[in-house]
Amino acid sequence: MRIRDATPADLAFIASANAAMALESEGLTLDPALLLPGVRAVIDEPSLGRYYLAEVDGQPVGQLMTTYEWSDWRNGLFLWIQSVYVLPGHRRSGVFHSLFRHLEAQARADPKICGVRLYVDRGNARAQEVYARLGLHRSNYTVMETVYRGPGSRH
């Protein structure tokens, strides 16, 4: 297995994986008119985030995206893990584990990074178990939001 940064050539895989993840985990159908340029924006503008892909035999089989949150309390950046997806035929084979360990090694080597966070749907017990085995734990925070565009928007 090889872990690498995404390139513009990966746009179709990433968009497809994001759409599959949203449908599978939350029952949401994503709008391609928002999704495709949303993925492209991250690939084109590293300050927005970064996609990592796991490959087996040269084919992508999983992904995760990171975004950034500045912590004034810690004078550092948290990496937020988002858009995690592993193709069904490659689950339970160490794909996410490899993606996470790759990210963790990069984060620990970068003095600007103070931690890694992610959010997970409360009903996704399987994902929560995977994350716990990797050393992630529940924080004291609950995510609250208001959404203006896309799935879950109320305005």
Image (cartoon, grey):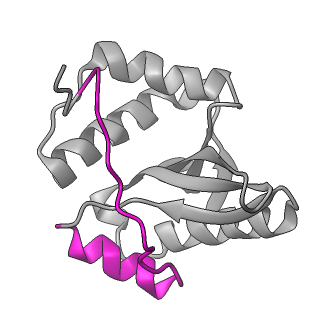
Range drawn in magenta: 123-150
Tell me which secondary structure the magenta stretch mostly adopts: loop
Q: What is the quadrant of the N terminus in the image?
A: bottom right
**Residue 61 visible in image:** no
* Residue furthest out toward the top: 33
The x and y percentages for residue 130 are 39, 79
Position of 27 relative to 95 (above/below): above
User: Is residue 90 shown to the viewer in this render?
Assistant: yes
Q: Is residue 90 magenta?
A: no
- Which residue is at the far front? 73
Where residue 114 appears, x then y in whole percent? Answer: 74, 64
Indicate the position of residue 111 as horizontal and vertical percent values: 88, 61
Residue visible at 25% across and 76% down in the picture = 126
> Along the horizontal axis of the image, is 55 left or right of 2?
left
- Locate residue 67: give its quadrant: top right
Closer-to-camera residue (148/43): 148
Give the side of residue 82 with respect to residue 70, left or right: left
Query: 82 or 87, which lies in front?
Result: 82
At x 15%, y 38%, the residue is 28
In this view, which residue lies farthest toward the left?
Answer: 27
Q: How many marks?
A: 0
Q: Is residue 2 left or right of residue 61?
A: right
The residue depicted at 48 percent of the width and 75 percent of the height is: 94
* 54 versus 140 height, above or below: above
Is 86 left or right of 112, judged from the image as shown? Answer: left
- At 35% across and 62% down in the image, what residue appears? 142
Which of the 4 quarters of the picture holds residue 133? bottom left
| Quadrant position of the C terminus in the picture | top left
Position of residue 129 relative to residue 146, above or below, is below
Residue 143 forms part of the magenta stretch: yes
| Residue 20, x across and y down, in percent | 25, 43
